[in-house]
Image (tube, rainbow, N blue to C red):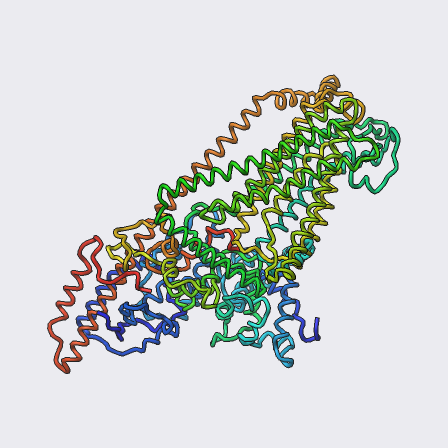
Amino acid sequence: MGGSGSRLSKELLAEYQDLTFLTKQEILLAHRRFCELLPQEQRSMEESLRAQVSFEQILSLPELKANPFKERICRVFSTAPTRDSLSFEDFLDLLSVFSDTATPDIKSHYAFRIFDFDDDGTLNREDLSRLVNCLTGEGEDTRLSAAEMKQLIDNVSVAGLGLAGPGSGREGWTCGLKPSHSQILEESDIDRDGTINLSEFQHVISRSPDFAS
Amino acid sequence: MAQPLAFILDVPETPGNQGQEPSPYDESEVHDSFHQLIQEQSQRAAQEGLELQPREPGASGSDHQTLRQPEGVPAHSTATLRILASMPSRTIGRSRGAIISQYYNRTVQLRRRGSRPLLGDMVRSARPSLRLYDLELDPMARGEEEKQSLLVKELQGLSVAQRDHMLRGMPLSLAEKRCLREKSRTPRGRRRGQQGHGGGFSCCSRLRYACILALHSLGVALLSRLHALMPWRYALKRIGGQFGSSVLSYFLFLKTLLVFNALLLLPLLAFIVGAQAAFPAAPSATASACTGLELLTGTVRSCRPLTGDQCTPRVGGLPYNMPLAYLFTMGVAFFITCIALVYSMAHSFGESYRVGSASGVHAITVFCSWDYKVTQKRASRLQHDSVRTRLKELLAEWRLRQEPRSVCGKMRQAAVLGIVWLLCLGTVLGCAVAVHAFSELMLQSPVVAGREVALLALPLVVSLLNLGAPYLCRGLAALEQHDSPVLEVYVAVCRNLFLKMVVLGTLCYHWLGRRVGALQGQCWEDFVGQELYRFMVMDFVFALLDTLFGELVWRAISEKKLKRRRKPEFDIARNVLELIYGQTLTWLGVLFSPLLPAVQIIKLLLLFYVKKTSLLANCQAPRRPWLASHMSTVFLTLLCFPSFLGAAIFFCYAVWQVKPSSICGPFRTLDTMYQAGTVWVRLLERAGPRVSWLPWVHRNLVENTFFIFLVSALLLAVIYLNIQVVRGQRKVICLLKEQISNEGEDKIFLINKLHSVYERKERKEKARSRAGGTEEAATPPALLTEGRDARWDGNGPRRLTLQPELLA
């Protein structure tokens, strides 16, 4: 370990261990990595717990650099009033949720918040298209075309109240249970309001066992 | 109809983050006040006039400013948007109050485990539409503090471990969790301090508490040490970070195989090898000189545990019944392996299969396909590519299903498929015939001592066939065009496995059928054990060569000669099938040479390091998307069913039907190996009444087939019950989904009603302000009646003029 001031006290360590999914070694390692990002004068224990690290520095960590959702992750875990920096406890929260032992419940909760690009509590079409663009890569040639995006996210009318979306060719009430028409909203929007809220998201996630990793 | 309203009607200023939640106990009052509310509102509109404080649209928090409306959609009034934003279904994920009340309910349920919770307490399951009586002027802080204090009270009622577990699982920030923990801890400490009187009593409880705390911290420390002690943790993390969880699944499978082999080896070491080593009998025959070649060919003579040649040691005067011990230990080891396999397969299956997971594949791909373990930029780019390919494939599949192929095309595809399958099967049969012919050849020309290298010919041929035939089949498979690439992988795995099983089957027939006959006067068990050892060694050599040439040299060639920057891919399916093949060989041979699992363990350890080094240096992650947990289940199933089942059948046949050799081995005096057991049972019958239950058990449960029938019938009944339960659950899910969509329809209906009410008011206000200071026309009563009519008539779905999907 580094200088004498950068060790965490035992009670604090025990408390962190009880409240997060991380082991003691992982917490100490996280503290060390966090202190490396701070300027020299803030590396003492008390200071490091209070200090805030800006997003640019956090995003320079190699684990986050390659992640397409890195800005969203930082924004979701930040508890600063201006939501633009992370404290040590936010950092621990981040690591805890992404660790192997975190429950799928908490992972899906935070995943929902990460995917909710406009922070309005639901995943609407705009969120979904930004999500798909993040997944497929940032380059112009790597994105899905607009037609594919539309087809993927929503092509036909979602609510069957006698309304038709443009060029859908389907009418009437669909009970939403036909597996042949499978786009994202059709599959996951159970109450047919055009958006995916947290419960629906968790329902979709629960069907995929790969999510926990 | 498309004018944004700047209108407020007593809707409180709610920043988007904090939703206002009525306390869970008010559920019954909510329902009644809901339509009362609407009445109040319309009356207020009629009587008071309209308050027109223009509120900036950004009043409801910066969140709405980022709401971009899709084109052609009328913007809703700010008030409607604000109400929409504070709908409980939207604030569940965000507002602290909602989270706290949700976890309050969970703790309550935890405490009253047996009883069903009251409906009024089920905040989360209550219809959001019913809970939207949001228009009170409660300050939010009070509501949340109330909820927090309720939660704290509930947490105090739990034990320490449960409380920590609950807190850990809450999606709140660390600071808030600490605060909750502090609050729920202090009163107890105070209470404990107040128990000062009755010194003995408090001493006892303090001691007990200290003990519990010490045990708890010890347990936590042990667990964390154990976690750190797990072998190869760092290496596996590195592999996962660089290549993703698909390649990681291969290494995890390797680890699982190590565990199985260790499980198999332990009883064998204890009862057979240990007894042999502790009390060695005099060595028989001539012990030939040991050369290095023996490691390769396994031809070891003399009384060693590696061969089947066991002598009967004497354990301190009592005869240690070696044949019985041998038989029992083998049987028990196989049984334990079987149980462990079936358990892990069931466990993996339970984790990776979900009811109804066949549908919804688009959503799952989009939400769940990013592998967060990946940390390298190059691998991340590969992931982007693979996700994009998968999405495009899904869309293409869907489009294809919409426009199905013509009959002609379908017939052509079926014909091509049929031909390719026939060719592959032909290849497999050809390999089997080749193996058979070669083994007959080996039979005809017996090997003289000193030229044992020739014994390696058969393993060499088999390994070559195992290497070459899959490539041939893959080449043929390029002719067929499957619609989905995942199916291609499955088909390739299937064919490869079929080839290996057929070849192994031919070899088993050769050994148990022909070899036994040919080696009548000699030690055939010895020979078979050595053969299997040779096969394992050859398999290992070929794996090394394959790694060397397939990965290292290929990368060198492709980089230097062909100047391509792409490294060779790590073929997961083929490598896993190699592992399964090696394990099958071990299981086949363990009856004849008990130390074979030890050899397999050494081989697996070496293979781990070799593969890991080669992977990190030479390979790249596979480009095809790979459902890691699903494939792990498939691998375990393949390990269990063709592989272990085949080995078990071989074992049973060898024990029950084949006559042991008469000059070596512990069974040399018996007709079949199984007779060792029956002889012992007869011995027990004669021994006396004290142990008579064992022969009775043997006679009625093992030899009597009625018992087996009964057990199978029970098992089938249980399976059938479970299938029916799953079917019923599927039906229930369907019904619930329908109900939820109906509720959604309710919600849209009400939102539209709300919007039309506000719009009418705004229009009325605009008309009023345009008319200057003139008094309101006689619209209020009309508005009131009209509103009421609109609200209270008809239960059927009305034709609405707004598109409900555009409410987001």
Give residue B729's position: percent from left, percent from top.
Answer: 41, 42
Give the quadrant of residue B649. Answer: top right
Residue at image location 68% in from the left, 36% down from the top: B587
Give residue B567's position: percent from left, percent from top.
Answer: 61, 59
Q: In this view, does B387 lie above or below B585?
A: below
Q: Is residue B522 above or below residue B237?
A: above
* Relative depth, front residue between B571 and B784: B571
* Relative depth, front residue between B28 and A114: A114
- In this view, the residue farthest toward the top is B686
Quadrant showing the N terminus of chain B: bottom left
Q: How many marks?
A: 0
Answer whether residue B473 is visible to the viewer in this image. yes
Give residue B201's position: percent from left, percent from top.
Answer: 63, 55
- In this view, the residue farthest toward the bottom is B773
Give the quadrant of residue B804. Answer: bottom left
Residue at image location 74% in from the left, 17% down from the top: B686
Quadrant showing the C terminus of chain B: bottom left
